[in-house]
Amino acid sequence: MKLGVPMEPEGETRVGIVPSSMKKLAKAGFEVIIESGAGRSANYHDSDYEAAGATIGSREDALSCPNIVCIRFPGVDGIAKGTNLACVSDPFRHPEHVKSCMDAGITLLSMDMIPRRLSRAQSMDVNSSQDNLAGYKAVLLGAAHVPKGIPMMTTSAGTIRPAKVVIMGSGVAGLQAIATAKRLGAVVYASDVRKSAAEQIESVGGRFIEVDGMDDFEDESGYAKPLTPEFIQKVNDTVCGVAADADIIVTTARIFGRPAPITVPSSAVQNFKSGAVVVDMNADVGGNCEDTVKGEITTTDNGVIIIGTSNLPGTLATTSSMLYSNNLTTFMTSLVNDGEVVISDEDDILVGAPEGSDFYVNGMGGVLICKDGEIHPKQTRLGGVL
């Protein structure tokens, strides 16, 4: 069984498989072919892969393998019919990826569609592993740009009060951001549209911002539900009011398959204090802050710094690649049966939980998007997008 790992496109510093995964992959029967230079930007060199047992080849060599693992969708050129392609294809925002795989007869396994509530899926959940690092790095970026110290300090020259940090959203990224800000010594406030998140926020050192009329706005797949415009406005007003005198504001609100909701309108930014830093974790999908510029760090007329870094895990490429590789290695080895990669409709990771189970999500399958030129029958929500 050959497994190809191509180089990622320009701007993506991570790599799909790292040398430490070779032992487990080889034990499962995989022969791994790495495109030369694929891991360089993440500090994994060709010599490291060779020492671990991988073969270094050309892009053509990697893409000719019957199984391909990467992060970004690589396109279909050079990939043969029947190939298993595992990547983060973001099929709802990029249905053209699905269509091109259907036309080429490629089996698309989109790792961002992992059924994260299944206990077996947790070790394969690339969303959680990458979001965790993104939340950590978001706070570090905020701390690096804010023009004051973070922890309380008592000095002979006077006492420095701790910085105030507001985290908007408390999913995986938000909880890590809260914990990181707390470890740095900040006073941390956090919000979420899921009322059940209050206990989680407090468990990592945050103070929950409650909004009148708040309910548990979470869907059956574990993602935040779309909110009414009226309630969004209420949440924005309440949380931005708390953030008005904050030193760092981190926005994490992401709705699966949709543009990021605006949680920090321009009018709120105008009320933030000079020197405040907004770190927008969703600049890549439109941004939570109305004034965010994707890929740039800007300063408003009233002195608010807005960070629109669009690939936060990529700024920690060595670690994020290692975690992604662990996720994908566990996933790929789980598919091996009698020396072959088997794409089975009996696998809940691939096709989603069976109807009637506690983990069933109507209209949503698992990571298997299309096979043999057809979208999987359980992906009816996605089918409506194509």
Image: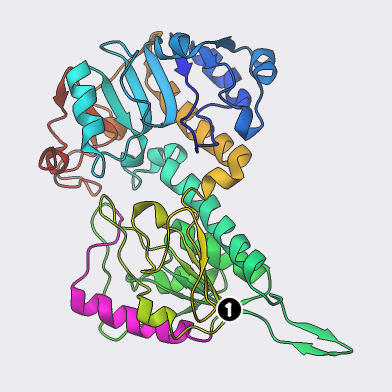
Q: Which residue is mark 1?
A: 247
Classified by dominant secondary structure, the portion drawn in magenta counts as helix
Name which quarter of the figure residue 268 lies in: bottom left
Identify whether 156 is placed above or below 123: below
Nearer-the-camera pick, 331 or 263:
263
Question: Identity of the amino acid at label 1?
Answer: Asp
Residue in view at x 50 percent, y 29 percent: 16
Q: How is the image coloured?
A: rainbow
Whether residue 49 appears in this view of the structure is yes
Residue in view at x 44 percent, y 10 percent: 60
Residue 70 point in image, percent of width and height? 44, 27
Identify whether 145 is placed above or below 254: below
Is 176 on the left or on the right of 53, as rendered? left
Is 94 on the left or on the right of 73, as rendered? left
Residue 334 point in image, percent of width and height? 41, 24
Name which quarter of the figure residue 331 lies in: top left
Q: Is residue 237 magenta?
A: yes
Q: Is residue 136 magenta?
A: no
From which residue to which does the magenta span run? 222-245
Secondary element at tag 1: loop
Residue 72 point in image, percent of width and height? 41, 33
Residue 34 point in image, percent of width and height? 54, 16
Nearer-the-camera pick, 157 or 169:
157
Nearer-the-camera pick, 285 or 139:
285
Whether residue 345 appears in this view of the structure is no
For the N terminus, the image quarter is top left
Dot 1: within a 10 Å radius of its alpha carbon, few (fewer than 14), some, or many (20 or more) residues?
Answer: many
Residue in view at x 53 percent, y 84 percent: 273
Residue at the right extreme of this rendering: 156
For the C terminus, the image quarter is top left
Is 348 on the left or on the right of 297, as rendered? left
